[in-house]
Amino acid sequence: TMNQLFSSLVGFGATCCASSRDEIVKHQSVVGLRSVELSVLNRNGSSVDHCDPAVLPFSTDSPRLGEFVGKLIHVDLRGNYQFKSIQDAIESAENGDRIFIHSGVYNEQIQLTKQIELVGVGSVESVVIELSGLGFDIRSLSESEDAVLTMEAAHGRIRNITFARKDGSGVVIENKCGDLIVEGCAINGGGTGIRVSDSASVIARYCDISGCTAHGVMSCSSSWISLEKCLVSGCFHGAFSSDLGTQCSIKDCDIVCSSQVGLVLHDEAQGLVDKSRLRSNRVAGICLSSKSRAVVTCSEIKDNKVGACVLEESSLVLQRSDLATNADGPLFMSECSAPLVVVDNAAPPDQA
């Protein structure tokens, strides 16, 4: 079983080395999330006191979401605009509206009940939605009743906001019913950073997800999640997907320094990893179990205890990927695993 495998491998498991922390800092610098400000300039180059959606850095194009072209609503803790509370602004909004959240620490739970867009104004660190003081409950590692933000609409988008929990439990962002795009956000702490289930979908781009006691991202119950140019670091599992019909796509991401596994696919889940780096995870870069399947292309799975674990009739396809420098070898396969297929691989597993 996975637990037995973890127990055997963790015995003298690899720790997250200083060079890996340097990789995290380097990645953040390259992506530039934490230094980008959505400050808005008028045609003369001077700052203006409102946010013109035409000059925001992220595209509003999406095959699954309509454009948010309704009215602009502003939230500011200091009372400079219409609302001091994000939830009050949401209740006043209509589908298609945009809500601009000005700098401050907003200690509130958000129910995204309208098809709208939430945008942080300023640096991502300056706009914080935080939940703390609820106490630790092991049941809340995967439950959503106390999520910082719960998606309750058919469509929505969130940009340039820090979401944080300090109690080490619960879900930070929960989606159980619609299509949600999360762009340029920092998601810190809690049990699970982003959880998607019940046939819902999440696209996360340019996000920094860290310090989750369970999963950086979790998908289950025939849901779909896509990570693009994200950094997932210092979580128990970086990404976890389970159940038949659940799909996980990871493109040009870094999943590093997990205390267990970078990517777990379980119970017939399917995954695609492309041009990504799964490094310095304590047990394994990837673990497949219970008839799960994954395709890994043009990726680095290095400096883990084991590169990839393939268990319980699961299968893995590797294409042009590097599984060198893993402490206990590139691959671990159980006897009942489906055949492993390696196609045009940069580091053929003849070392296995």
Image (cartoon, grey):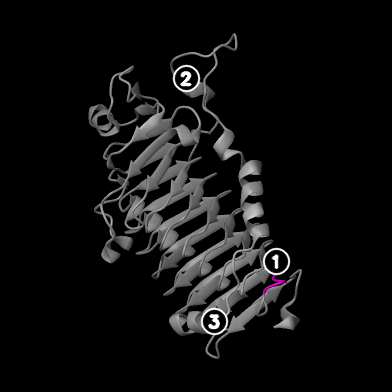
The C terminus - image quarter: bottom right
Crowding at dot 2, Cα within 10 Å, few <14 / some 14-19 / many 20+, comes out as few
- Per the rendered image, the range of residues in magenta is 322-326
Sequence-wise, the earlier of marks 3 and 1 is: 3
Q: Nearer the viewer, mark 3 or mark 2?
A: 3
Q: Is residue 292 above or below residue 144?
A: below
Q: Circle 2 sits on which residue?
A: 52
Q: Is residue 170 above or below residue 86?
A: below
Identified at 55% across, 44% down, the residue is 206
Q: Residue furthest top?
A: 44
**Residue 309 image position (x, y, % from top left):** 57, 78
Q: Is residue 119 left or right of residue 282?
A: left
Report helix, strand or loop for mark 1: loop
Report helix, strand or loop for mark 3: loop
Q: Nearer the viewer, mark 3 or mark 1?
A: 3
**Residue 259 image position (x, y, % from top left):** 51, 67
Q: Circle 3 sits on which residue?
A: 11
Q: Circle 1 sits on which residue?
A: 321
Sequence-wise, the earlier of marks 1 and 2 is: 2
